Image (cartoon, rainbow, N blue to C red):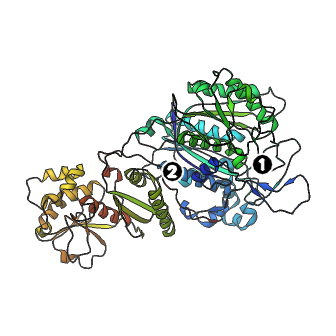
Amino acid sequence: MSTAIVGMACRFAGAADLAAFWDLLLRAGDGGTDLDEQATTDPRYVPRGYFLENPTGFDAEYFGMTTEEATALDPAHRLLLECVDEALGDACHQPASGRPTVGLFAAAAPTTFRERPVDADPSLTTRFGEFTLRAMNDPAALTAGAAYRLGFTGPCVTVTTACSSALTAVQLGALALARGECDIAVAATVDLVDPVPSGYTRSEDGLLSGTGRPRSFDASADGTVFASGAGAVVLRRTADALADGDHVYATIRGAAMNNDGAARLNFTTPNWDRQEEVVRLALDRAGVEPETVGYVECHAPGTPVGDMVEFHALASVFREVPAGNTCVVGCVKPNIGHTGVAAGMAGLIKAALAVRHGVIPPTAGFRTPSPDLPFDTTPFFVNTLPVPWPTGDGPRRAGISAFGIGGSNAHVVIEQAPPPDDRAKGVPVPCLLPVTGRTETAALAALDRLQSFLLSDEEAIADVAFSLQVGRVHHRWRTALVHVGDGAAWSAVSEAGGTPRIAFVFPDSSGAYPGMGRELYETWPDYRVHADARASDTAPLAPGYALAGLLVSWGIEPSAVVGIGTGRRTAHAVADGITAVEVIDAGTHLAGRADLLLIAGPSGVPGLPTIPAVAAMAEGGESAALLGAVARAWTLGAEPDWRRLWPDRRPRRVSLPRYPYQRVRC
């Protein structure tokens, strides 16, 4: 069964998010940092490394935690929690309510940094208790803790296969989807070497680089450099993803895992035959030939033995590729260092972006091929500039390898997703775009990011609106835009205070105008149903009744209906179909009713602070006025049934700007 990658998130050295990571890759950037350290005179000491920006920063309030709870939690666990949430946000499958069953398959390297939170603040033991502290920070509780914070109810499994953990987690997630154990699977990994930037002592065995720069496949390679990093991917069954209009980066065609076993020199030495076997098995399961693979993201740590064994194993698999065919091989480690258990995740995200965008990023720092790697007898080459990757005779395909210390091998084959259908074609504006934040500051930052996105991105506005409506968590600080072509007007950011009490106000016939409700009738099926039911009634009863029915079908239910003049008949007709609704027969009785949000229909009411739900002269017409009323109700706490706003239209989910976490040091 094919598996789709529908969301991704990452934090690596020199790349704080997915967009920055892609930029780093395309320009062959080096995310490493040279340190100005004079702490030792040891000539083996290397004052360089690959570090995350603000690795201990965390938005505790966003995840429903106190600052003390966040401080007591392992920073690596916090980092993974944020990455998982961000990946779900990128997939637009984030809301906690009504979400399908979600499974989590994750790995974290053992904590190796010098100062744990409990060491820095021993009072944490007194406040939480030693058992609780141990339980919440136990590596085995990594996925259980995330499931508790994010509300996952599917299988949640902590994975440990060293440097192949990420691709192992991906395969376990895909298997859980195929078995029907969950509807969404998240694979995530984190390796936090040390929150405090520091150098390291190079090794004499060639494992650790003396230059502080891993050089995959290069003649100057002298070892690897371990680094901090985290990443997550959101997986769905491909058929489900395409049916739901998901944003698909790539699909997983096949994958395999095995182990080197006992046939090797020692525990840490890789086995050429077993690496060849795992690649062949993944290709066989994918049902594709090696010559159809245009790129292989290699493990390639930059060590003499590791690179040589992997290259020869891969060359054996591609030995029978027809003459003239070429395949690019590359590695992300020269960009961000060797991220340990997250190494396979970095490679998978890089390859998925390459498949998605049709560009193969260069391998940073590559100059001269290693003489131990016979490139001239293989179809392989290493690119030093971005290489355009056209579709050609078939979809773009890539392989990703990860080999764990101790012999745990994994390989995944991905390919370009089928092109999405143009679901938003013909969908008219206006559209309602909701924006939220856990705090007012976050809401304003989210609004700023979305405005920049709308100016620079070419996504259809209907797709953006749909993704914001159904794909993101709606927090208590809210603002909204009713987009009417080139016109855009944001409501003020306000704090939702629970479900507001809403009154539908029906004025007398003096507010009627020729053709009232015609646009709504032609645009919204629910409006037509209610209007046709009152087709024999005189105006303005039919438009008012139909408007109320439309709003109720969207989940905007009134606590009261108000009739003014001839509008009393409409109010009573509407009240007959709604239980537990207060009927008010005169607008003057609304004096002092500050608890009611007044949505007027079919037009505004002079002298009352109402929100017209229909206004013929409003910019964008009647639908714009209607959505403006819904937006105002939502910003104050109402929760519309967003999918009912798209009754006969099927927008796509699109990748949107990430949430602006308000991180503080914990």
Q: Nearer the viewer, residue 486 or 498?
A: 486
**Residue underneath mark 2:** 90
Query: Residue 213, which numbered label?
Result: 1
Identify which residue is drawn at 64% across, 29% down. Answer: 326
Which picture quadrant has residue 492? Answer: bottom left
Q: Is residue 136 above or below residue 504?
A: above
Q: Nearer the viewer, residue 62 or 392?
A: 392
Residue type, mark 1 in image = Arg
Q: Nearer the viewer, mark 2 or mark 1?
A: 1
Residue 588 visible in image: yes
Query: Residue 527, which numbered label?
Result: none
Residue 557 visible in image: no
Q: Is residue 280 left or right of residue 554?
A: right
Residue type, mark 2 in image = Asp
Residue 196 pos. (x, y %): 75, 60
Quarter of the image for the C terminus: give it.
Answer: bottom right
CB of mark 2 within 8 Å of CB of mark 1? no
Residue 125 pos. (x, y %): 71, 63
Identify which residue is drawn at 19% across, 78% down. Answer: 588
- SS type, badge 1: loop
Which picture quadrant has residue 163? Answer: top right
The total of numbered circles placed on residues is 2
Residue 615 pos. (x, y %): 22, 65
Q: Nearer the viewer, residue 553 or 288?
A: 288
Q: Is residue 384 left or right of residue 488?
A: right
Q: Is residue 418 above or below residue 108?
A: above
- SS type, badge 2: helix
Residue 55 pos. (x, y %): 67, 59
For disc 2, the neighbor class at 10 Å (few under 14, some 14 to 19, many from 20) is: many
For disc 1, the neighbor class at 10 Å (few under 14, some 14 to 19, many from 20) is: many
Q: Earlier in the sequence, mark 2 or mark 1?
A: 2
Q: How many angstroms separate mark 2 from mark 1 (CA)?
A: 31 Å
